[in-house]
Amino acid sequence: MHKQISRAFLICTLFLSSLCLAGDSGGQSTPGVPASSSNTTSAAQPTTMKVTAYTLSPELYKKAHDRGRILFRLALISFAYGLLVLWIILHWKLGAKYRDWAQRSSARRFLQALIFSPLLVITIAVLTLPLDIYSETVEKRFGLSVQKWGSWIADWVKVQVIELVIFTILIWLLYVVIHRSPRRWWFYFWLVSLPILVFVFFISPWVIAPLFNKFEPLQQKNPELTAALEQMVRRAGEDIPPQRIFWMGAGEKTTALNAYVTGIGASKRIVVWDTTIAKMSTPQIVFVAGHEMGHYVLHHVFWGILFFAVLLLILFYIGYRLIGWVLSRWGEGWGIRGVDDWASLPALLILLTIFMFLANPVANAFSRHQEHQADQYGLEVTHGLNPDSGQVGAQAFQILGEVDLGDPDPNPVDVFLFYTHPSIPERIQFSLSYDPWAHGGTGEFVK
């Protein structure tokens, strides 16, 4: 799904909803909707041969590298296309027309929001739909997605409904605070929107994710694997009941391998996809779960929320500083009466989209740091449980790269701008080289 526009408002939810193992590049996935990956016979059975580096067959190498280049170009096009959509809305004065319809229908601002917001959100969704369809077509062309178009359309509609509800509330609140505090709306909107975003993240595992995939306690699906994971949990010194470890049925839509930690407080859980269970051995899955345990133990969800809360505050402030200048120069031509006019929202979204794109390197570097820490934790917590934790970790990443078509030679600019995880070659190299126990030492996180 195209995320440049919505990410400005929902960055916390979109980013933190899946602190996952996957190492591919590309856009952010919608909460609950898995990113598709390749279907390769080379990883149909768990890899047990010794891994010394990330290696692919010539055919698979070309396929993975070609896909990486296409995703890189698609990410850049998505950014430019998102700006074009917002400019079209401003140029055609659609925001002004929707505002007029809303104000003629009611004098109450909340009822105006119920009219204006859905019209604008649906317009953006329809205009960006061709890019969504193209993205899914690319995945199918590479043999990456197994989801039928009917199911894909149903998921797309669900996403629009979810975003429609969230955005309508946020847009209404935004213009309430702009109207009441023209000078400090950026701060007050941040204060009122952040709890909403955290609440969405909190309920996502219970309310949103089940709309797209089936979840069951892993203990019911695979008691033996659950027992192995419980041993790892005890090794970590944590008290995470089996009820917090879930099996997810992803195979109907994708052959991707993945696992992730999501939720906060009572909704926090570890999720392992059925495809991962089918294509990895028990030690490899224990390492994958150890990686996810790292997110859990190292409080990555909390630090992620804090990091992106500060980032949102900065973005809103920059938007406040520049929106007045933008409207004074072009607002009259767009039919916008002022900052507190509903029709000013597309202009504000253009600013936030640009700033979010410019902040991508910082945000993704933070994400890659957390993922690297989780990799390290996975190696440490499985040391002594797996015969060779480094080799098992390297095997897990080799399978992940083969199945998910991890680019063996990614463009450095792509990594800088869009990679939320270290590349597969980097993760395998780290797994094979990290050995603090060789000379009698201990791990950093697990003593």
Image (tube, rainbow, N blue to C red):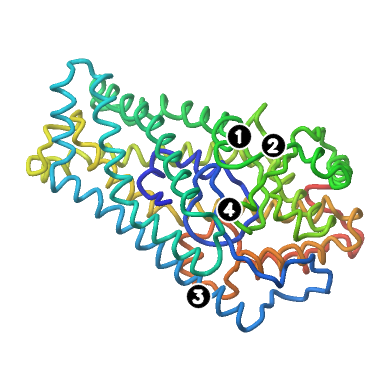
The first of marks 3 and 4 along the sequence is 3
In the picture, measured across the screen, residue 404 lies left or right of residue 106, that is right
Kind of residue at badge 4? Lys
Given the current orientation, which residue lies at the most extreme top position? 108
Disc number at residue 66?
3
Q: Spatial distance from mark 1 to mark 4, Cα to Cα?
A: 19 Å
In the picture, measured across the screen, residue 289 lies left or right of residue 253, that is right
**Residue bearing the label numbered 4:** 253
In the picture, measured across the screen, residue 438 lies left or right of residue 87, that is right
Kind of residue at badge 2? Arg
Crowd band around label 3 with a 10 angstrom C-alpha radius: few (<14), some (14–19), many (20+): some
Q: Nearer the viewer, mark 2 or mark 4?
A: 4
Crowd band around label 2 with a 10 angstrom C-alpha radius: few (<14), some (14–19), many (20+): many
Kind of residue at badge 1? Pro
Q: Spatial distance from mark 1 to mark 2, Cα to Cα?
A: 8 Å
**Residue bearing the label numbered 1:** 205
- In the rendered image, residue 190, in percent from the top left (x then y), is placed at 40, 30
